[in-house]
Amino acid sequence: MDSTPTEVVVFEFGPYFRAYKNGRVERFFGTDKVPSSNNSDHAVSSKDFLIDQETGLSARIFIPSTIKSGQKLPLLVYYHGGAFLVGSPFCPTYHNYMTSLVAEANIITVSVDYRLAPEHHIPIAYEDSWAALQWVAKHHNNEGPEGWLNDHADFQRVFLAGDSAGGNIVYNMVARAGIEDLAGLKILGACLVHTYFGRKDCEVDNYWLFVCPNTSGINDPRINPAMDSRLSTLGCTRVLICVAEKDVLKERGLLFCETLRKSGWDGEVQIVETEGEEHVFHLFNPDCEKAVILLKRLASFFNQDMAN
């Protein structure tokens, strides 16, 4: 007779993550690693860079393989989603989507591998994400450690983007950039896709409580921008908010748009809604018609001034 005690599950995130009372966690998404490559089928090259040896913070950098000597392209810093619990720039889902986005938009992308909860509770994800931005800023005067950024990044056209929890990180990064210096680096635009925020008409959900046990609750400005004194001084000039009709987070995205417009922030805010689709549908069905339309919309956001 098997006398092995059954482990007690204390938290689950859909089919992607499970945590046990004894501290063990299981991740069922984002653990597979696609190797970086040169001249892929999408004519995009990629390589990995260790940003901080002490913490293990790293990133995967993507660049069009057809780029020419001296050519400068917009620079995107991307933060993946996954409820702060799962996901990685190196997994097939995000590697493939970044490859498609770089090919479509003709941009350079730094996809950040921040540390995950519960091994590293909030605010570690924010601190890693800010450290990655500071690392990017070191290249502002072509003096950074990564040659692709020194040689080809247009630091007059720097964007941040992220989906779900990554969209939340993007918000917190541009909020911080509005009050702290990034070695002279200016962020032109921020794109928040199906972003994870709290709801003003209820308590915070179990996801946030699990990844941030020391939260102040629904008044925590990190998930409720309406309570954030930094909202009116966001450190970018334009924001694109993307929502999906059947996404449970849709109303939170719409509320953020309304709150931002009323905040006194003097930038430009745009909102795009995809009808009939669920949360981050574009990542799991990237070849469907609406995912392609969204991809092109993002590419347009990163290139809207290129003709000027």
Image: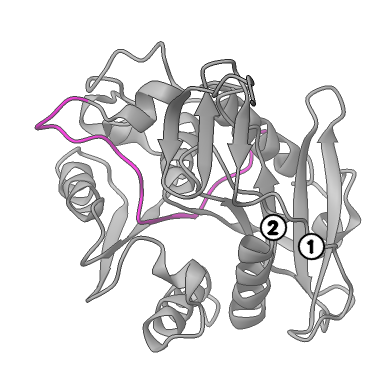
Viewer-proximal residue, 38 or 83?
A: 83
Q: Position of residue 77 (x, y in %)?
A: 62, 52
Q: Is 184 placed above or below 53 here?
A: below
Residue 181 seen in render = no
Q: Is 130 placed above or below 120 here?
A: below
Q: Amino acid at mark 1?
A: Val
Magenta-colored span? 181-203
Viewer-proximal residue, 192 or 73?
A: 192
Classify mark 1: helix, strand or loop: loop
**Residue density around tag 2, few if under 14, some if 14–19, many if 20 or more, within 10 Å:** some
**Residue density around tag 1, few if under 14, some if 14–19, many if 20 or more, within 10 Å:** some
Classify mark 2: helix, strand or loop: loop
Asked if the magenta segment contains residue 249, the reply would be no
Asked if the magenta segment contains residue 194, the reply would be yes
* 1 and 2 marks in contact (CB < 8 Å): yes
Residue at the location (23% across, 24% down)?
A: 227
Q: Position of residue 187 (x, y in %)?
A: 53, 48
Disc on the earlier residue, 1 or 2: 1
**Disc 1/disc 2 C-alpha distance (Å):** 6 Å
Q: Position of residue 147 (x, y in %)?
A: 90, 56
Q: Which mark is residue 34?
A: 1
| 300 left or right, relative to 61 | left
Residue at the location (44% across, 85% down)?
A: 288
Q: Amino acid at mark 2?
A: Cys
Task: State the residue position of label 2.
Answer: 91
Which residue is situated farthest in the front direction here? 1
Task: State the quadrant of the N terminus.
Answer: top right
Q: Is 4 placed above or below 82 here?
A: above
Residue at the location (21% across, 46% down)?
A: 252
Q: Position of residue 251 (x, y in %)?
A: 17, 51
Residue 175 appears in which quarter of the rendering?
top left
